[in-house]
Image: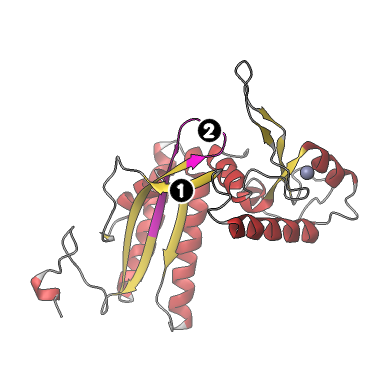
């Protein structure tokens, strides 16, 4: 496996296009004759090669996930790899977490750089689509680049575990969706999702989802990048309201 295009985008956006250590922007603006120069590097926190610095302890399929990557300038990447005694896995995770919090704290003032806005080409969803089968949910995962979720509070432990497992699975699928190309792999994913949806239904939960089409604008990109966001909610069947597409409850559901 290698770092997917989607993972790369997520990493760069969450890092604000800046090195997590020195905070420099890792891309220089282009000129009339030259493209922008990129000196940002996606460094592994837990290393891929077994003999390398910070090696081991992470499942193969998580090595290239965005949680295990940190955006660094070339100078700091070299420093990190040269000084594994100082830049331990724990310290790098801390640096990354602090950096992303700092980027978020910049808010819109600095976000002339990058910003998410609704895509006017798509109608914005008003209600969740009721999901009863694996196939439509998998299609939504495949067209999305990020994921958010919601679930009820005060659940029984085993219900909560099942829902969290389901959400974690969706998150993993979102990360690797681009790499699953064969019909068989796609079919297997749909079946797995189907199994969770059925199990949740047996326990009285409904699954709802929509894809919100956003655009990533600003930064050095000339054009906005499509940035579809998947939202998945698990709700208790007894408190969910089923409506038509514009949000009007069906008569027998009105309360
Ligand atoms: Zn740096």
Q: Quadrant of residue 239?
A: bottom left
Q: Nearer the viewer, residue 233 or 166?
A: 233
Q: Is residue 67 visible?
A: yes
Q: Outermost residue, front direction? A: 109
Element type at marker 2? loop
Label annotation for residue 221: 2
Considering only order in the chain, which callout, 1 or 2, is on the residue closer to the N terminus? 1
- Give percent across and percent down for residue 197: 34, 63
Q: Quadrant of ligand 1?
A: top right
Quadrant where the image shows the N terminus: top right
**Type of secondary structure dominating the magenta stretch:** strand
Q: Is residue 30 above or below residue 160?
A: above
Disc 1 Cβ-to-ligand 1 distance below 8 Å: no
**Is 83 a magenta residue?**
no
Q: What crowding class fits label 1: few (fewer than 14 Cα within 10 Å), some (14-19), or many (20 or more)?
A: some
**Residue sitting at x 35%, y 51%:** 211
Find disc 1 in the rendering and name its residue: 116
**Residue sitting at x 66%, y 58%:** 102
12 sits left or right of 46 in the view: left
**Residue sitting at x 68%, y 60%:** 97
Magenta stretch in the rendered image: 217-231
6 sits left or right of 50 in the view: left
Q: Outermost residue, left direction? A: 251
- Give percent across and percent down for residue 234: 36, 69
Element type at marker 1? strand
**Is 227 a magenta residue?**
yes
Label annotation for residue 127: none
């Amino acid at each position: 496996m290698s770092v997917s295009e989607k993972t790369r985008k997520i990493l760069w956006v969450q890092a604000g296009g800046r090195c997590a250590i020195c905070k420099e922007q890792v891309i220089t603006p282009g000129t009339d004759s030259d493209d922008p120069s990129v000196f940002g590097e996606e460094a592994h926190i837990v290393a891929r090669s077994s003999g390398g610095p910070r090696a081991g302890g992470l499942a193969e399929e998580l090595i290239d996930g965005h949680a295990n990557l940190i955006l660094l300038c070339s100078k700091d990447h070299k420093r990190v790899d040269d000084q594994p005694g100082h830049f331990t896995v724990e310290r790098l995770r801390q640096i990354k977490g602090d950096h992303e919090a700092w980027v978020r704290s910049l808010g819109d003032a600095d976000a002339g750089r990058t910003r998410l806005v609704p895509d006017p080409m798509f109608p914005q969803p008003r209600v969740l689509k009721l999901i009863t089968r694996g196939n439509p949910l998998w299609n939504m995962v495949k067209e999305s680049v990020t994921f958010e979720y919601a679930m009820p509070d005060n659940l029984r432990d085993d219900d909560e575990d099942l829902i969290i497992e389901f959400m974690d699975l969706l998150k993993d699928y979102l990360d690797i969706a681009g790499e699953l190309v064969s019909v068989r792999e796609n079919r297997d994913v749909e079946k797995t999702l189907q199994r969770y949806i059925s199990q949740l239904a047996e326990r009285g939960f409904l699954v709802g989802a929509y894809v919100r089409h956003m655009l990533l604008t600003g930064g050095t990109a000339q054009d906005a990048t499509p940035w579809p966001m998947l939202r998945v909610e698990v709700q208790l069947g007894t408190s969910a309201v089923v409506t038509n597409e514009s949000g009007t409850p069906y008569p027998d559901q009105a309360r």
